[in-house]
Image (tube, helix red, strand yellow):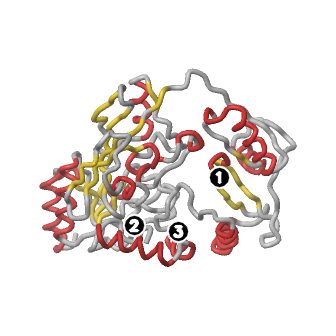
Amino acid sequence: MAESAAPLLAALKGIVGEANVLTAEADVAPYSIDWRDRYRGRPRAVVRPGTTAEVAAAVRCCAEHAVPIVPQGGNTSMCGAATPHDGGHEIVVSLTRMNRVRAVDPDNATLTVEAGATLASVQQAAAGAGLMFPLSLGAEGSCAIGGNLSTNAGGTAVLRFGNARDLVLGLEVVLADGRVWNGLRALRKDNTGYDLRQLFVGSEGTLGIITAAVLKLFPRARTSATAFAAVTDVASAVDLLRLLRDAIGDRLTGFELISAECIALTRRELRAMPDPLPGHAWYALDAAFPGLRYVTFGHLGDGNLHYNLAAPQGTRGEDFIGGQARANRIVYDLVARFGGSFSAEHGVGQLKREELTRYKSPLEVELMRRIKRALDPEELLNPGKVL
């Protein structure tokens, strides 16, 4: 440990307790790598506060020492947003100890929860009150609600209930200087100036650290039905979506699309799984990458598809990955031409920073930088992410 780091670490231990300041390599390792093993960092320490007051005190302490902070929830980021850099200078602030449900209000259909609570635990708390929190995604057993909000997570029910942005009524946020903005209001109508909560939703911890939220709850469905249908191409899937919307309106919760290539790859790993509807495929091969396999799936209902490119048969993965930048440019340029987005639900993080400056207008980037400077002038909150 560098001698200059000792005063900071001593102060942090005084705030959260010695057991909650991790510095040993083995202890910090789980917080230093993203779950896809694409980004590896080396933080100075991992701090695990247990209350909002401790988060605020830790942030003030880091600000006094001009030490940057990487907020982290369940560490399930797809874009490296929660992974520290490898300089050994940053402090990871893990919110996993802040996992309490503070209040449930069945009459107003709201739930107030701390940012470190897993999405699954939020769903369970809502169910315990006879209600439902509709955000649902594959990592719900490990992702934290603070991370869901900071990346504006989508999931499988966006078609009916919207993104995370649409499911939050109020926030509690620790700012870069350690002050706490208490915006934990459960109002559904509040037309009193700028909507500050939406400034922090989707900001990936670069403007403030979300510590708690008031979430919207909904009545539980009495019945549900799921259909698995085969279509010949994407246009036919869009036609089917239109037909279902006309038939059942906003009762349609989700509409997912999956290619035959996805089914084939899944069955290769899960050999006992039958082919549900053999003989149907809608993917196509590109002249740019001969033999390329499109592993395409996702949320057609809300216009968000995941285009994963698999190497042609017989090609080594390490050889194929070298063409990633070229493939991204082809796809992103085409998406931009049709008014789409290079990131629909996983955020920007480290992975797509260059894409943001490429596809956002200069004015949009300038406004984002102005907001960042206003709220975090020393650039201590999650540096190198988004912008």
Q: Which amino acid type is shown beneath numbered disc 3?
A: Lys
The image quadrant of residue 67 is bottom left
Q: Name the residue under label 3.
A: 352
Q: Which residue is drawn at 45% across and 55% down?
A: 151
Whichever of labels 2 and 3 marks the residue nearer the N terminus, that label is 2
From the viewer's side, name the closer residue of 328 and 34.
Answer: 328
Residue mark closest to the camera, 1 vs 2: 1
Residue holding disc 1 = 303
Residue that appears at 44% across and 46% down: 143
Picture coordinates of residue 148, whole percent (x, y): 44, 49
Which of 315/258 is in front? 258
Q: Is residue 318 visible?
A: no
The mark lying in front, picked from 1 and 3, is 1
User: Is any part of residue 379 visible from this angle?
Assistant: yes
In the depicted structure, whether residue 318 falls above or below residue 345: below
- Image quarter of residue 386: bottom left
Residue 256 is tagged as none
**Residue at 54% of width from left, 54% of height from top?**
345
**Mark 2: few/some/many CA within 10 Å (<14, 14-19, 20+):** some
Compare marks 1 and 3 and give the one earlier in the sequence: 1
With respect to residue 290, does 170 lie above or below?
Answer: above
Which residue is labeled 2 in the image? 41
Relative to 375, say whether 248 is above or below: above
Give x and y (percent) for residue 274.
77, 35
Label 2: state its secondary structure.
Answer: loop
At label 1, the amino acid type is: Gly
Give the quarter of the image for residue 285: bottom right
Front disc: 2 or 3: 3
Q: What's the distance in space between the residues labelled 2 and 3, CA to CA?
A: 18 Å
Q: Earlier in the sequence, mark 1 or mark 2?
A: 2
